[in-house]
Amino acid sequence: MNAATGNILRDQAEPRRADVVLGEDWIAPDGIVDSEIRAGRERRGLISLNRSPLARKIITFNLMAMIVLVGGVLYLNPFRDSLVLQRESGLVAETQLLADVFEAQLPQTGPINLASGDGIDAHRTVSGIELPEGAEIFVFDTMENLVVSTVGMERPVPEEVAGLSRDHRSTLITDILNTVWEAIAGLLAPEGTEETIFATEDKARDLVPGALAGETQIHTGRDSAGAAIFTVATPIRNGDTVIGVVALTSVAGEIDQLVRVEREQVLQMFVIAILVSIGLSLVLASTIANPLSDLAAAAELGRDKNARKMSPNRVRIPDLTARPDEIGRLSGAMRGMVAALYERIEANEQFAADVAHEIKNPLASLRSAVGTLHVAKRDDQREKLLHVIDHDVRRLDRLVSDISNASRLDSELVKEEEETFNLLKMLGNLTEYLGQEAKARGVDFISDLPAEPIVIQGLEGRLAQVFVNLITNAISFCQQGDAVRVWARKRENRVLVVVEDTGPGIPDQALTKIFKRFYSERPEGQFGEHSGLGLAISRQIVEAHGGVIWAENIRPTDADLTSDPLGARFVVGLPI
């Protein structure tokens, strides 16, 4: 990677932190982040809701989930149902206890009539019972006539018991939301669940027939003020005979107050949860929206600056790779993508410069030959100049064709689809064909390929182009009596294909240059016949397949590296 790319990418060897990075906790070097982005960070606080649709969505969705949860709890009203059940059970027990009081005063013999007072004084019995203010007792005879009630009757004040006083805690939030709540509950309540408004005596009288039949009756309703009232009627028995009914109504609104207090507690927790949810949502949004905003701003700044074409600068993506999440991955991917784009741009610029340089050489030779042709007087001189012109034209044609192929290679490698093929079968076909060419030049050709197939994934035509180039190069450097050997071996998860020759070898100073574009190390008789792009294209194809390629000299002994080479060796390693 070149130096320019290093300005964008941080050292990949730097260890990643495993802790959670919140908000602006990540720190980037001054050279990494543009001043415009830093100024934008300073202008915003923890997060700017008016500038971040993503932050608004996070907060809105969190609040909606909280509202649905609390609304469901209030609508289902489980604590009210529990309180109602408990109060109904308690009121039934109280009413049955009142019936037991009447039954305990009945004489063993003689007539019994609640209406006439025979056998028991119902008025005196009722007046002696202590009731909470608002609770009422009604006594009916077997003819469903009201015998006595506590309505308007003077009765003793109940003794207060410590710890059993009614809950009078403030319900400010409930009072404020009560109107809205009742309206919503009224709209959402199922049909047939409306509670009928009634007078206490009338409802008590409605329960008498069922109680006279020997069963305890219970009903829940509301009075004219909308307060909930519970009514229970139970029979008074003399042995197995029902002689009357006693009905008890609860204090109006006592359950409503308890429900209101419970609802107030839920709403208080709801308000606290809302505040906590908003705070956490802001923190969460800052960890997501702010870094994404910086990444987008950096890309937009680079786009706008480069669009002006006056003083284009590099796109500097903030370094968020310390974050152990998807945003860190996105930052690293964007930085790598930008670095690869700039590397490609610089490579294209260098390629264009090299192309211009390579084309100038034959053009200069052509210009000189054409200029000299005008003043040449002898036929042999003209023939020689025409030969030079023909050589330079063919050199230009070959150079332009190779340049065209090299420039299209990147896009073609991306477009072509890989396939599974037998590498040894492809090498066998190439060696059979190119071996004939070598033998025609008096060069021995040796093919040493394993018997078992080696199957790889890749572009068969492009890899064939690599091996054709390596083998033809080896043949071109050999003279009559030399040899070329092609062999392959499988090594665990890779395959090595080696092309060796017994030619003059590669100069030591050229071992690191031969894969560069337009570099050619040829004998004098082959000058101008090669563009110097073959090995560069081969390396590009091999690396696109995830492989490696290198060149080395064959030495008679590794102990003496100064000895003359016995030939050259090119090694291609491909993954399986």
Image (cartoon, grey):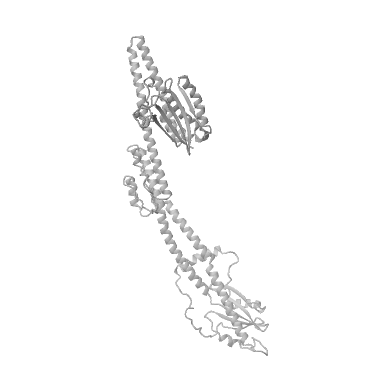
**Vertical position of residue 485 compared to residue 306: above or below:** above
Give the total number of marks visible in the rendering: 0
Left or right: residue 405 versus residue 239 is left
Asked where in the image residue 221 lies, by quadrant, the reply is bottom right
Q: Where in the figure is residue 138, as x and y percent of width and height?
A: 60, 81
Q: Where in the figure is residue 266, as x and y percent of width and height?
A: 47, 66
Residue pictured at 42% horizontal, 50% vertical: 325
Q: Nearer the viewer, residue 127 or 334?
A: 334
Q: Nearer the viewer, residue 419 or 55?
A: 419
Q: Where in the figure is residue 425, as x and y percent of width and height?
A: 52, 30
Left or right: residue 145 versus residue 155 is right
Q: Where in the figure is residue 73, as x and y percent of width and height?
A: 51, 64
Q: Residue furthest top?
A: 378
- Asked whether the viewer can see residue 163, the reply is yes
Residue pictured at 36% horizontal, 51% vertical: 26
**Vertical position of residue 293 compared to residue 229: above or below:** above
Asked where in the image residue 370 lies, by quadrant, the reply is top left
Instruction: Give the position of the N terminus as an image quadrant.
Output: top left
- Asked whether the viewer can see residue 312, the reply is no
Asked where in the image residue 20 lies, by quadrant, the reply is bottom left
